[in-house]
Amino acid sequence: MSDPVASPFASERALKRLRRRRAADRRFKWYGRLAIGFALAALALLLASIATQAVSSASYHVVAFDLNLDKKTFGTTRPDDPPPVDKVYGLVRSDLLERFPEADTDPALRHELMGLVTRLAVLPVAREIVRKPRDIGTVRRAALPLSDDLDLFLKGATARHLTVPVGRVEVDEDELPAVTLTGAGAFEHVIAVASLEAMPELGSPGAGSILMTAGASSLELTRLTTSEATGNLLTGSIDDFRAHPVRARLIPAPESERTISDRQIAWLLALKADGRVARVPHWSLLTHTDSTQPELAGALAAIVGSLLTLLITAALAIPVGILASIYLEEFAPQNRVTGLIEVNINNLAAVPSIVFGLLGAAVFLGAFGLPRSAPVVGGLVLALLILPVVIIASRTALKAVPQSIRDAALAIGASRMQTVFHHVLPLAAPGMLTGAILGMARALGETAPLLLIGMVAFVAEVPRGPTDEATALPVLIYSWATQAERAWEPMTGAVILILLAFLIAMNGVVVFLRRKFERRW
Amino acid sequence: MDGTLGEKTAPDKGVLPDAPEVAARMSCRNINVYYGEKQAIYDVSLQIADRSVTALIGPSGCGKSTFLRCLNRMNDTIEGCRVEGEILMEGENINSPSIDPVLLRSRVGMVFQKPNPFPKSIYENIAYGPRIHGLAQGREDLDEIVEKSLRRAGLWEEVKDRLNVAGTSLSGGQQQRLCIARAIAVRPEVILMDEPCSALDPIATARIEELIDDLRKRYCIVIVTHSMQQAARVSQRTAFFHLGSLVEMGETDQIFTSPRDRRTEDYITGRFG
Amino acid sequence: MSEHIVSAFTEELERLSADILRMGGIVEEMIVDSCRAVLHNDLELAAEVIERDPQVDRMEADVERQIVSLIARRQPMAHDLRSVFSALKVSGELERIGDLSKNIGKRALNLDTAVFPAMRSGVARMAGPVSRQLHQVLNAYASGNAAEAKAVWESDDEIDQHYNALFREMLTYMIEDPRSISDGAHMLFMAKNLERIGDHCTNIAEFVFFQITGENLMQQDRPKL
């Protein structure tokens, strides 16, 4: 450019305008990126919080028992007998009392001891005895789940405790069960940790507990100075304190505010020292049905219930939705009536799901008298719920098939029906299936309508058919999330993850179908 | 009726000023087409000669495509479209209720503006029509129909080794010839072409034009085109439509050297408006 | 006729017909001037007429070039096609007329200046109607008047009559005085040239008529006078 002023592209104003325009472009790009970033961050936060909550329930603690199934006790068991829960629990009880004889003296202590393992925990073992009577007469090793609070204690989720190594100390056997441990400055570190945790002095109200453990034995301290610790033997023997290094366990929460007692902790630690406590994968979450005891509860009944419900939903919503959409899109005349139908379908898709629940309760339960809490009713209601979604998605898929394909088929003398079924449907099928599966995914996640038709019931049996009592995964999440006990929290997270896994699997199927069957034209 | 223009079907001199002695395959009388309230075609009468190419030209929206779609009742598929008048084909009015449009369309094939092969194999594209009309006895018969149709469409040599390849994977020109082969496969008497080359490059266009010239020996062809040069090249007779009316119809030579109507003149010399 | 949507097309057609008319004007002048040179024994004018012919040839070549390009680029149809076609033919006819006029000029240079000036007036008499015919047909071309073109076509007989009269006159001269034979022969050729020019004018009239109406004059009967 010989003359920069003359060129419209080189003037100062033009360059400035250009810069502004480019800056606006860049800004807009960043707004978009920020929006995506925000959405992703929110999703990640959600997933992470659920996952961290759920991760502690991926494994749980079990206690090993050697159950002597002697013929005298179990000899008469028949395959159709009820499971001999009490008899098996009796074995557990005698095993525990044998291990911790100090509890045998007092019914309250016995009760406390039996709190380690719930009675119903032996149910699977008892069932198996009935199923396989030839085990009778042998010693069966069984791993029974630890009571949920003690499990959480070991996972550090409840009654938070700190372990401080003390090392070897002198043991003064006062007057049993009182024991005094001495060592110059041996407990300085323990006291420092206790004051750091702001624990009030032992014996004062609101004070936590300090246990001294060595081997399988534990002391509960009543007095602690830098070089002397006095306490009562909870379990085990004094010899352990001579033979093993001593460790202090500080539990800042006072015993009255905990769900587990110092004694239970002492027993648990003793069992652990015996090597009978193990942390194993929590498969029972998938194989057990619901239970009042968190350590025994599982989502199996809800998974089966959800699958049964979805089966009914699919069997109803997919064919009806697809046929309706084909008729509306390919055959129906465009007039006032079809226009009205279209508007209403679109409106139905926006109706809150709880309304469908009310309708289901009134019509299917009230008028038709179908059984409460049954997957068949849930399936019907959910089918009604997702029908508009399926119809809309299918119509969109049909609309996306170019008119030229229909023209081509019609022009060589295919009938309407041949045109639709030979040419239009194969092209629309991936889209229609996508819509159907997305609708199913929505049905899988619906809670509100199921609550109203009674699928929130406590179901301890795996439903065998669509008319049995059942619950569904999202409802299970709802009922577990409303439970008071701490142990339900990670379990709820775990079930949410199971539900998410189902949803992701369904979406994966959608992506797969798209890739596989999508054709370009 | 032997297909020649008898006294009875001869149109008024005013409508068809130079109606020559052609063997008419289809003769249309007083065709009026309405889209709902709107009239798209006004009282069109014309003869379509057998074994020749008739070109319909005219500005966009003049009704030539609508008229073409009357000839195989494709307008039936359009909501709210109503056709009045008589289209005689071998003495029968194709608009009469006794005629099944599905059967009619097997006699009057159609090729569209955009090549629209089915997203299936080349073989299936051709075989579909004969199959639904039951034209083939057994597989060998069908193979023969497919080969013959592809040969007639001048596509056989190019695709004979890959009949199982998707029809949509061919080039645009090949796809259009495939569509023509598909139309031929059901043994039509008339082939309607709605701007068959408008999506093609000049070489592919030339191939189609060569094909049309070849097909003329066997079929009656009606072609709608926006390219006057194309109409001049491929057709024997040309009809000029304007605002839904047939303005002028005559021998292509005459239309393009000395049209009688001022509107035709203005349109083909590029003076419209 | 209204304008083309592509205005350059109209401009090109207009330029073509302007060139034809310009060429026609030059050729018309050549006829008159060549005959004037004969009449006045104006050797300078005759030489000038001869010099004008290459210009006409160049113009014809230019018109042909324009036409080839126009056909290639515009693919004219209907009236446009006919006007391009007639421009091509008319330019060829004009070029031939130019050649014939040049020939008259050449013969004017070779006439025996001393004898029989009276012989020369015959050619000049014939030149009038011939140049008028050309003028008229060019008018028809310029104005698009088919009737005028047809009138030219019909009046060709008049030229023929002039020619026949001139022929007899020259024969008379040559029989009376053999010295006049040389000039008389020249004069006969000039008259023949003028008669040929008249034929070219009727050809032009035919093309102009075809351009305007799309119909062919030759299929019609020419009235005999």
Image: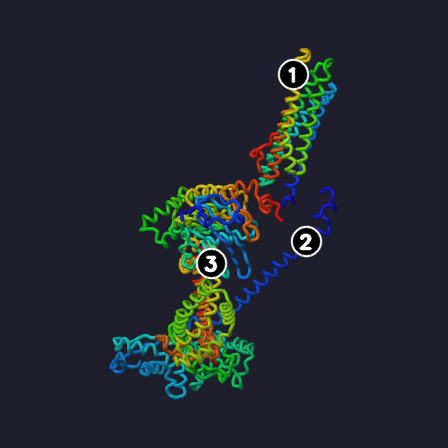
Expressed as whole percent of the image width and height from the top left, the position of residue B71 reads 46, 53
Mark drawn on residue A19? 2
Q: Residues within 10 Å of mark 3 (few under 14, many from 20)?
A: some
Expressed as whole percent of the image width and height from the top left, the position of residue A78 reads: 25, 80
- Give the crowd class for mark 2: few <14, some 14-19, many >=20 residues within 10 Å: few
Task: Determine the residue located farthest toward the top in the rendered image.
Answer: C178
Residue A459 image point, x, y percent:
39, 79
Query: Circle 1 — which element?
Result: helix
Q: Nearer the viewer, residue A234 or C207?
A: C207
Residues A75 and B236: in front is B236
Considering depth in this image, is A174 or A164 the residue closer to the camera?
Answer: A164
Q: Element at badge 2?
A: helix
Q: Is residue B131 visible?
A: yes
Q: Is residue B118 left or right of residue B239?
A: left
User: Label 1: which residue?
Assistant: C171
Name the residue tied to disc 3.
B76
